[in-house]
Amino acid sequence: MIRLSTGQNNEQIHRFQKQMNRMVVGQETASHTIADSLSRLVAGIQDSERPLLTMMFTGPTGVGKTETVRCLAETIFGDRRAFTRINCQEFSAHYNISKLLGSPPGYVGGEIRPQLAQENLDKHHVKSIENGSGMISEVDSHLHRMYPVDSEKKMSIILFDEIEKAHPKMWNTLLGILEDGHLVLANNEEVNFTNAIIILTTNVGSNIISEELTQSHIGFSSGIDSEKMDRDIEEAVQREAKKVFPMEFLNRFDNIIPFNTLKHDHLCKILDNQISRVHYRALTSNEPFLIEVSSRAKEELVKQGTDPEYGARPLNRVIETNVVTPVSRYICSEQIRRGDLVMIDFIDNEFVFMKEPGVDWETDPRPHSNISKPQWTKTDLGINDDGGEKEEIAIEASKVLAYSGDFE
């Protein structure tokens, strides 16, 4: 007999978990739980009469719940937008449910395909196969063997965002989907959800979370206090969820996964991610240039962008206001040109922008006009770089993925 090791993991699962820990900062417990759930899916031992996975994400706003769905879509289909998102705020009235299920033939809207029509769910799988992107198209992956190219089965990811804002009639509709994996539309077409990952997010208990965060000064509290507060918030959210949703509804999920509040260290890591995205935008603009942000400027950005009640969203707005907007003005006034290195610092209570000019593109004899953007970062930076420091910045920035989006 050979004893099996719990430390080993599938390469694709490991890739997803690594990607999620990089993009969804501060949610290691959620990452581990979702990776375990994904392992059951990849192993092919899930219940064939129910959806592949059913999960509910709970916790404060702005901590990465929707971002996790994007990360999952990017892993499986190679596109972070490859999922069907149902914004539950649009279904607060019972008569709006027809947008999901369609209208019977002969009624107003009967000719419009409903959001939950089978082809709408399957289109991301089809596109992934056509583009050869994502885990689903990797020949050596378990998912590819489960869903070969010639198979009629198509995998999908469906997000019901902020489910507590939907009319209870939608909850009743979901009961059947979560339990039986099938749904009959208004035109009598049957939709198969047994190949779907279904995820619901909720901000239920947000008033309790807000009170707890306001009292705790979470961004600067000790680790022990933070852990206790996260446990208190999780228990409070669970109590509120039981008050809002019927127990038979909550019992339908494979996992109910709490997302923690973001601490100061998490916001610093998120800032680095956000700055990398801004740098990528600078490198892929019509007149590419380099950006470097000092540690003092980063600390001030985090300070201004810390609002425990709203997670990482304020930080993104602070970056747009204090970095992207001023840089945009300098580009429009032609103070920043192709090949410049823009350095951002925080001096005397204000953000200061400086630059080291690049090569003079009008007088320099080299044929820069024939250099493509990727080549610009690798072979001909278009900047004066005697010590090689700027080249290091450019090479590091060129590794940043084309990644954008808000934290949800």
Image (spheres, rainbow, N blue to C red):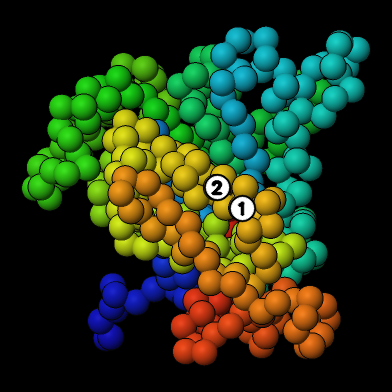
Residue bearing the label numbered 2: 326
- Mark number for residue 117? none
Badge 2 marks a residue whose secondary structure is helix
Can you tell which quarter of the image residue 261 is in?
top left
137 lies above or below 315: below
Image spot of residue 123 (x, y percent): 76, 49
Comparing 264 with 106, the one in front is 264
Comparing 398 with 85, the one in front is 398
Left or right: residue 261 versus residue 115 is: left
Image spot of residue 200 (x, y percent): 48, 35
Which residue is painted at 75% across and 84% down in the image?
364
Which residue is painted at 79% across and 76% down in the image?
362
Left or right: residue 268 versus residue 293 is: left
Q: Amino acid at mark 1?
A: Tyr
Q: Count how many numbered circles sit on residues in the image.
A: 2
Q: Are marks 2 and 1 in contact (CB under 8 Å)?
A: yes
- Mark number for residue 330? 1
Can you tell which quarter of the image residue 231 is in?
top left
Badge 1 marks a residue whose secondary structure is helix
Which residue is painted at 71% across and 36% down in the image?
191
**Disc 2 versus disc 1: distance between alpha carbons?**
6 Å
360 lies above or below 351: below
Q: Amino acid at mark 2?
A: Pro
70 lies above or below 106: below
Toward the front, the furthest residue is 363
Does residue 212 appear in this view? yes
Which residue is painted at 79% across and 17% down in the image?
103
Does residue 283 appear in this view? no
Comparing 106 with 138, the one in front is 138
**Mark 1 surroundings within 10 Å by alpha-carbon count, few (fewer than 14), some (14 through 19), many (20 or more):** few
